[in-house]
Amino acid sequence: MNTFVPPSRAFKALSSDDLRRVAPSVFAEHARPSVSARYTFVSTAQVVALLGAEGWEPVKASEQRVRLEDRIGFQMHEVRFARRADLEAGSFEIGATRPEMILQNAHDGSRAYRIDAGLYRLVCRNGLTVADADFAHVSIRHVDVSADTFAKAAQSVAENTPRVLETVAKWQVVQLPQATRVEFARRALALRWDASQPVTRLLNPEKLLAPVRYGDAATDLWTTFNVCQEHLLRGGDRYMGHVEGTGFRRNRTRPVSGLNEGQKLNKALWALADEFACN
């Protein structure tokens, strides 16, 4: 078995200081003053501690960019968790995928606590969210929060982990002809941009299939899915052509920066791959 010992951050939990630096809203001490009187405040920092007691450690965090001053510190944020046992392993088989749990919340009343199953492709540090259609997410209203609620949510995600990994294994043996891979990339591109945007017409779908690293040249569905996902999320692909009203245009795709946009795209790509697996 080929194993790889990655940079330490792939197997290192975030400290409280790390979390506070990248997502201060996790540590809000009260809700945004304008929220409903029925809103029950539970700091995300408390939930991080509760999930830690269930064996999940935070490994990545981010928060939404906001312009309104009174939303700063209360905006939507996302924390990704890995199982403590996986972090303590310290190495992994090349090409392995790690199950994760994704927590989203906001202290401004804009959304409930939400927990989704996720995966982390260790070779490229590429995180994704599993589609609701296959693996139900857990949504917790702020009027229903409790330690027991989050413990049950964590257990639900853990129980779904084998099913998620079974799907990955299934996709790894589905070999796609080149024409089918190009069709996958074309449909994946349409999930990122609508038909009115020039990039939809000017970007060659085959660019989304370009290998990012060694091993990405494989033609199975799982690799095709991951390569397309990484291109779409990270951006940087060049495209050029004539755009009406502006003449000849040279440009490159931008990375996905919004939390909602990234999660929506991830889930749509997962559903697309599942469709190709069934054909």
Image: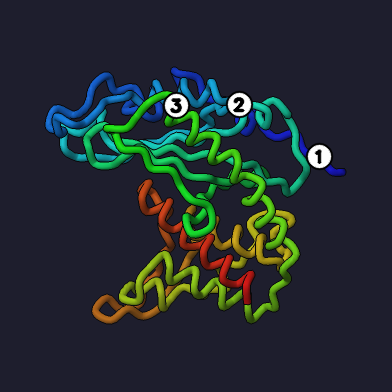
> Could you tell me which residue is drawn at 60 percent across and 72 percent down?
276
Q: Up-down: is 127 above or below 208?
A: above
Q: Name the residue under label 1.
A: 3
Is residue 235 visible in the rendered image? The answer is no
The x, y position of residue 66, in whole percent, is: 24, 40
The x, y position of residue 273, in whole percent, is: 57, 66
> Could you tell me which residue is drawn at 18 percent across and 29 percent down?
32
Which three-letter amino acid code belongs to the residue tagged 1? Thr
* Mark in the foreground, 1 or 3: 3
Q: Mark 2 points at which residue?
A: 12
Which three-letter amino acid code belongs to the residue tagged 2? Lys
> Could you tell me which residue is drawn at 14 percent across and 33 percent down?
36
Q: Is mark 3 on a helix, strand or loop?
A: helix
The x, y position of residue 279, in whole percent, is: 63, 77
Q: In this view, does 77 lie to the left or right of 154?
A: left
From the image, which quarter does the N terminus lie in? top right
Mark 1 neighbour class, 10 Å CA radius: few under 14, some 14 to 19, many 20 or more: few
Mark 2 neighbour class, 10 Å CA radius: few under 14, some 14 to 19, many 20 or more: some
